[in-house]
Image: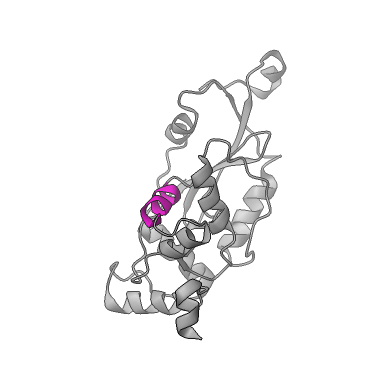
């Protein structure tokens, strides 16, 4: 990674990766943006920004430039979401580093409505690969833009939460609580009460094919 002061950027020909950091109730955030759109959202309670930036730029030659001005709208939108005042994001995204399959998964997940949950299986069906439940999970584990692409809305069919790329299962529970008002999902993963409440939220999952015919 090459970090160059902003006043020296005109002398360099490397692509610019703009970034901003900020603190919120659920942890510290690092957001990056290329000229094409948002590249990443990284957050954790104990986020090491330098290490996270190094990981994001490993093997690339880019100028990493802190830019609070051009990323202010993104920061404000994430803060609004975390306070319950926003239900979606309209920022342009740069998914150029993702595979075609992963991009299809992320685009499908981006369409999951606020406050709703879907299963990994239903996302696999939506992208036309009904047997690809595990690859869907792997694609979401590599989601570079958690919250903006709401992979926290995808859970296991049995009512367990599954993994989460944005800081682990506890963070996933917290985001579902913000959206659904289902307070108390911090029960140990897999406990009966948690499973039943999550499966209740999954009842709104669209039925397709044989399932739709069985329900009719």
Apparent side of residue 185 relative to residue 123 in the rendered image (left or right)? left
Q: Residue furthest bottom?
A: 216
With respect to residue 26, does 213 lie above or below?
below
Residue 132 x %, y %? 40, 54
How many numbered marks appear?
0
Residue 148 seen: no
Q: Residue at x 58, y 36 (%)?
A: 96
Q: Nearer the viewer, residue 166 or 5?
A: 166
Q: Residue at x 63, y 27 (%)?
A: 16
For residue 199, what is the image quadrant? bottom left
With respect to residue 19, does 156 lie above or below?
below
Q: Residue at x 67, y 36 (%)?
A: 36
Q: Nearer the viewer, residue 181 or 25?
A: 181
Residue 47 x %, y %? 43, 43
Query: Magenta region's main secondary structure?
Result: helix
Residue 80 seen: yes
With respect to residue 141, does 87 lie above or below?
below
Residue 80 x %, y %? 63, 60
Q: Which residues are magenta?
A: 132-141
Say whether residue 128 is magenta.
Answer: no
């Amino acid at each position: 990674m090459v970090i160059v002061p902003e006043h020296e950027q005109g002398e360099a020909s490397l692509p610019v990766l703009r970034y901003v950091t900020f603190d919120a109730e659920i942890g510290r955030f690092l957001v990056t943006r290329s000229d094409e759109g948002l590249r990443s959202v990284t957050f954790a309670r104990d986020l090491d920004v330098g290490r996270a930036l190094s990981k994001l730029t490993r093997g690339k030659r880019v100028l990493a430039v802190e830019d609070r001005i051009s990323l202010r709208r993104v920061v404000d939108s994430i803060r609004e979401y975390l306070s319950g005042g926003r239900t979606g994001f309209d920022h342009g995204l740069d998914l150029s580093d993702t595979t075609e399959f992963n991009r299809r998964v992320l685009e499908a997940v981006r369409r999951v409505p606020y406050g709703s949950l879907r299963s990994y299986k239903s996302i696999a069906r939506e992208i036309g690969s009904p047997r690809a439940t595990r690859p869907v999970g792997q694609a979401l584990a590599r989601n570079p833009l958690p919250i903006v692409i709401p992979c926290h809305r995808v859970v296991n069919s049995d009512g367990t939460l599954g993994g989460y790329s944005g800081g682990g299962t506890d963070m996933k529970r917290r985001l579902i609580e913000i959206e659904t008002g289902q307070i108390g999902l911090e029960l140990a993963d897999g406990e009966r009460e948690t499973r039943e409440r999550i499966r209740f939220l999954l009842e709104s999952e669209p039925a397709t094919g044989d399932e739709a015919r069985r329900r009719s």
